[in-house]
């Protein structure tokens, strides 16, 4: 039988969303590297930013990501960059996400290797963020990036914002970069049979982490005006710990107080298979089920 | 992006379970053919039979299956075969099962191509069975195989058992073969908080097709003596039509009459991803969910 296939995802964000020639050059290593697969890249002209989704074995993925960063450094000059999306570097953020037969610890280790290599090879200061962060105040990307490229020249000299790798000096054209590990996001929305946004918002506040709710849940109330209903819109930032069914049942539980019921739900974008298998396991009450029993996993091995 | 990958499964049963040298020769084409993957093969000495599980693109899969059948014909002589499992041919049965980006109609078409080719290349009479059957009385494999190799010499001469392809004469050493298409089986058991086997059996009878229950459900009551409970043990023969959640909820509904509750469930062996995703969709009430949103599907494409 074949050896077990390891799959790590990387979603690097590059600060170029307009010049197609440059964008193609940047993604080229993801097309050309064996063991790596370019799943998607989408450029936003207003944001002037390109988001790449690539998966592969950690080793070739690391090589391809580093090569793409080198190409971005050659072609992007942050002193001339303008766009609506906040940014602090030519390569703004590089998250690694464990997908299959790799753990979040593997993703953390990989992010640190890549961070160290970015610093030594390209002389760009690197902040480790999310699950790779070296201190709690560095977990949140928005906190690191605050002040953006322009403000980073001074910010980086403060002790609390000393980079994890590389020079204590903003790179003149490439700025700084955040590298880290995170779990795949699950964007999960639950529809309610009320048009009252206040109810949806009140439920969202109770379900989410900052309101005393589930640890890996962000949530807000949203109006679906055409349908005359509302929605609790959630981001589940670690479905292995805050399961989809748990968020669902907690919304149901809180809705009960208002005499409101769930009338539907949706998953936005991609979702890891394991997040949905877990839902089936819970509602069926499966005993001793292993994800290896899923036929497709056997085929993918 | 890469082209869509088609995956058909084939589970051919060969009437040799003892001679390892011959078994290795038979499975060799599944190892050697590009685009085909040997997932499993297991031999039973008492049955004197080997069950192979192989997946691949329909075209190379067809070639590999035909090659393996030729090898089996060279090395297996049914006049000398003894074993506990009923059998009518050196290659006893060849089911094709749609897995991914292929339909059951594709599996039916493939089974007919393979059947015609077995007849013309190896002079073996072929019965189409299950979803490929040319008449209702030929759907059930057990009905076709009744009489086994020994009885087939006469049986095949009856009009109602005329083969779909090949000579109206049992092959002297290779016998006859059944080729067809079926959906993947889901073996699904639901545990009940009663030790009374009669209750489990009564529920099984109501849930299953022959008792007036679900179309693609076979079921029986089973005692789990060590745990002091019972189980409704089911085979779901087409999960796209008789969904896992529907069988589950029907057991729950019928159990209510006896004041009995579901205390767990299990899936035995492999299960297609879609069967479990469907469960998650049902219990969450997902709107407009597509299996293409499953990350792993995107990666496998």
Image (cartoon, coloured by chain):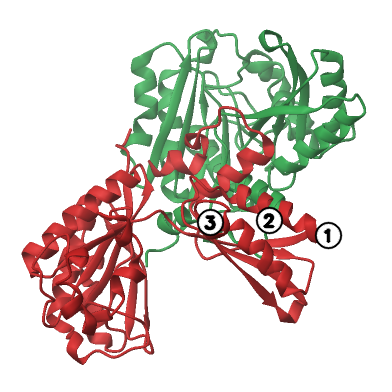
Chain colours: A green, B red
Q: Which mark is residue B209?
A: 3
- Disc 3 crowd rating (10 Å Cα; few below 14, some 14-19, many 20+) is some
Q: Residues under labels 3 and 2: Cα distance?
A: 13 Å
Residue B229 percent coordinates (x, y) = 75, 73
Q: Chain of mark 2?
A: B
Which of these two is toward me, A281 or B177?
B177
Q: Nearer the viewer, residue B57 or B283?
A: B283
User: How far is disc 1 from disc 2 in space, using C-alphas?
Assistant: 12 Å
**Where B16 falls versus A283 (above or below)?**
below
Residue A86 position by quadrant: top right
Residue ID for mark 2: B251
The residue under label 1 is: B259
Cα–Cα span, label 3 and label 1: 23 Å
Q: Is residue A36 above or below residue B77?
A: above
Above/below status of A34 relative to B11: above
Comes first in the chain, label 3 or label 2: 3
Tags 1 and 2 in contact by the CB under 8 Å rule? Answer: no
Per the rendering, the mark at residue B160 is none
Residue at the image position 46 percent from the left and 51 percent from the top: B238
Q: Is A114 left, or right, of B253 in this rendering?
A: left
Please report the residue visible at 6 percent of the width from the left and 63 percent of the height from the top: B120
Of callouts 3 and 1, the N-terminal one = 3
The picture places residue A279, in percent across and down from the top left corner, at 67, 46
């Amino acid at each position: 039988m074949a050896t077990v296939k390891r799959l790590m995802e990387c979603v690097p964000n590059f600060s170029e969303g307009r010049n197609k020639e440059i964008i193609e050059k940047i993604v080229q290593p993801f097309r050309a590297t064996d063991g790596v697969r370019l799943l998607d890249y989408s450029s936003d002209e207003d944001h002037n930013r390109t988001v790449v989704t690539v998966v592969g074995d950690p080793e070739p993925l690391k090589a391809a990501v580093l090569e793409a960063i080198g190409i971005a450094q050659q072609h992007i000059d942050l002193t001339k960059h303008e766009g609506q999306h906040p940014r602090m570097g030519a390569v703004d953020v590089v998250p690694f996400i464990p997908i299959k037969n790799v753990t979040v610890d593997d993703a953390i280790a990989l992010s640190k290797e890549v961070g160290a290599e970015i610093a030594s090879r390209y002389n760009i200061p690197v902040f480790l963020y999310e699950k790779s962060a070296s201190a709690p105040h560095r977990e949140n990307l928005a906190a690191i990036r605050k002040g953006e490229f322009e403000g980073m020249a001074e910010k980086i000299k403060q002790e609390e914002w000393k980079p994890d790798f590389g020079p204590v000096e903003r790179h003149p054209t490439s700025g700084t970069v955040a590298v880290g590990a995170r779990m795949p996001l699950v964007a999960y929305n639950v529809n309610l049979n009320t048009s009252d946004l206040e109810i949806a918002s009140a439920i969202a506040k109770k379900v989410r982490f900052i309101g005393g709710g589930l640890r890996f849940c962000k949530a807000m109330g949203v109006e679906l005006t055409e349908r005359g209903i509302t929605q609790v819109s959630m981001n589940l930032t670690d479905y292995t710990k805050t399961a989809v069914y748990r968020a669902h049942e907690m919304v149901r539980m809180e809705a009960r107080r208002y005499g409101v019921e769930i009338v539907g739900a949706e998953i936005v974008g991609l979702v890891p298979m394991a997040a949905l298998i877990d839902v089936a396991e819970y509602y069926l009450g499966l005993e001793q089920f292993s994800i290896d029993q899923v036929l497709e996993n056997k085929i993918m091995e």
